Amino acid sequence: MHNDNYYFDIIRYNIKKERKKAGLTQQQLADKVDITMNYLAKIESKKMQRGLSVTIIGRIADALNIDIKNLFNPIPKQKIEP
């Protein structure tokens, strides 16, 4: 069984990866999702451990023009932070 951090790390990693792949800054993605850049920065950092809703995850996926399931892809082993 995985702890909560495991799931947050997967989502955090994939949001940041997909945002960069789309060529968007945190501010640009935040504007598309209608959240603050500060909130998106927290989502992408280890500071966000609670309070991330499925609705926000879905809106981020929509703004990135990807399927929401892409935000749940496992992190490649070489990319896992200690």
Image (spheres, grey):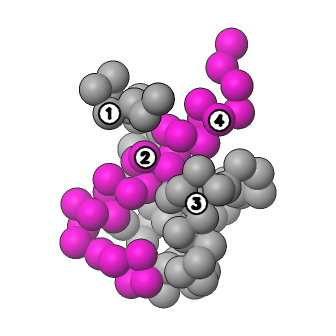
Do the CB atoms of the residues marked 4 and 2 lie less than 8 Å apart?
no
Q: Earlier along the polypeptide chain: callout 2 or callout 3? A: 2
Residue 62 magenta-highlighted: no
Q: Amino acid at mark 4?
A: Asn
Q: Earlier along the polypeptide chain: callout 3 or callout 1? A: 3
Q: Which numbered disc covers residue 13?
A: 2
Do the CB atoms of the residues marked 1 and 2 lie less than 8 Å apart?
yes
> Picture coordinates of residue 47 (x, y %)?
65, 56
Q: Which residue is mark 4?
A: 5
Magenta residues span 1-29
Indicate the quadrant where residue 78 lies: top left
> Picture coordinates of residue 60 (x, y %)?
49, 65
Examine the rendering and report whether any part of residue 52 can be seen: yes
Q: Amino acid at mark 2?
A: Tyr
Against 16, is 29 above or below? Answer: below
- Locate residue 4 relative to residue 19 in the image: left or right: right
- Marks 4 and 2, how far apart at CA: 12 Å
Q: Earlier along the polypeptide chain: callout 4 or callout 3? A: 4
**Mark 2 neighbour class, 10 Å CA radius: few under 14, some 14 to 19, many 20 or more:** many
Do the CB atoms of the residues marked 3 and 1 lie less than 8 Å apart?
no
Q: Which numbered disc covers residue 43?
A: 3
> Picture coordinates of residue 31 (x, y %)?
48, 86
Quadrant location, the N terminus: top right
- Marks 4 and 1, how far apart at CA: 15 Å
- Marks 3 and 1, how far apart at CA: 18 Å
Q: Earlier along the polypeptide chain: callout 1 or callout 2? A: 2
Residue 7 magenta-highlighted: yes
Q: Which residue is mark 1?
A: 79
Examine the rendering and report whether any part of residue 68 can be seen: no
**Mark 3 neighbour class, 10 Å CA radius: few under 14, some 14 to 19, many 20 or more:** many
Of 56 and 6, which appears nearest the observer? 6
